[in-house]
């Protein structure tokens, strides 16, 4: 079972009480990946968010040298690396759209906590303050990632 204290180190859960963190923890499951393992593929359907408990991932998008200012390797452009306490796949909690990038494990071992969209919605329905706080923090996280991406285009 996942301990809610582990989630205290995750930015999107800033402002939650220990009880609220435990509510979230009961809805997560843990998986482990080794370096090079593909966690999710660009354009796949999405139903879950990932929390990096330990390790590192890299996020890449399909692109050609002509379509992106960063160098493409094997048809992909590395956008960002994320480590412990950060999240990816959070847009699935909001819109269930297709994945916008491919995510690979870039350090061994990498432990991830996975939260399904339905579980997230259920927790938010049970505790509106929890839901508001997490969604506000997710919005801040998405803004950070968008700004980082936009700076790479300059």
Image (cartoon, rainbow, N blue to C red):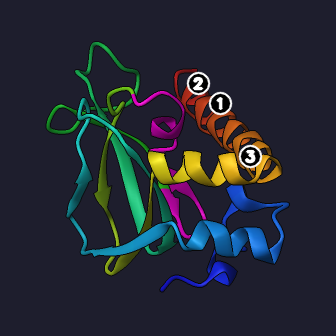
Left or right: 30 in relation to 94: left
Residue 76 in the image, given as x and y percentages of width and height: 24, 35
Q: Nearer the viewer, residue 137 or 36?
A: 137
Quick check: is 128 in the magenta stretch?
no
* Mark-to-mark CA distance, 2 and 1: 5 Å
Disc 1: which residue: 147
Q: Nearer the viewer, residue 83 or 140?
A: 140
Q: Residues within 10 Å of mark 1 (few under 14, many from 20)?
A: few
Q: Secondary structure at mark 3?
A: helix
Specify the quadrant that holds the C terminus. top right
Left or right: 7 in relation to 149: right
What span is in magenta? 82-96
Mark before the other along the chain sequence, 3 or 1: 3
Quick check: is 91 in the magenta stretch?
yes
* Mark-to-mark CA distance, 3 and 1: 15 Å
Q: Quadrant of residue 148?
A: top right
Q: Secondary structure at mark 2?
A: helix
Disc 3: which residue: 137
Q: Residue furthest front?
A: 126
Mark before the other along the chain sequence, 2 or 3: 3
Q: Nearer the viewer, residue 20 or 100?
A: 20
Asked whether disc 2 touches disc 1, contact meaning CB atoms under 8 Å apart, the reply is: yes
Disc 2: which residue: 150
């Amino acid at each position: 079972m996942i301990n809610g204290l582990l989630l205290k180190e995750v930015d999107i859960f800033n402002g939650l009480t220990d009880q609220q963190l435990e509510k979230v923890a009961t809805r997560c499951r843990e998986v482990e990946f080794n370096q090079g393992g593909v966690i999710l593929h660009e354009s796949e359907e999405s139903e879950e968010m990932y929390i990096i408990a330990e390790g590192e991932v890299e996020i890449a998008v399909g692109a050609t040298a002509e379509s992106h200012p960063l160098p493409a390797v094997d048809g992909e452009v590395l956008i960002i690396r994320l480590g412990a306490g950060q999240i990816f796949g959070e847009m699935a909690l909001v819109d269930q759209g297709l994945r916008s990038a491919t995510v690979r494990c870039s350090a061994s071992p990498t432990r991830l906590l996975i939260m399904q969209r339905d579980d997230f919605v259920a927790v938010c329905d049970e505790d509106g303050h929890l839901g508001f706080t997490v969604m506000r923090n997710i919005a801040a996280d998405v803004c950070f990632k968008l700004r980082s991406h936009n700076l790479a285009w300059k």
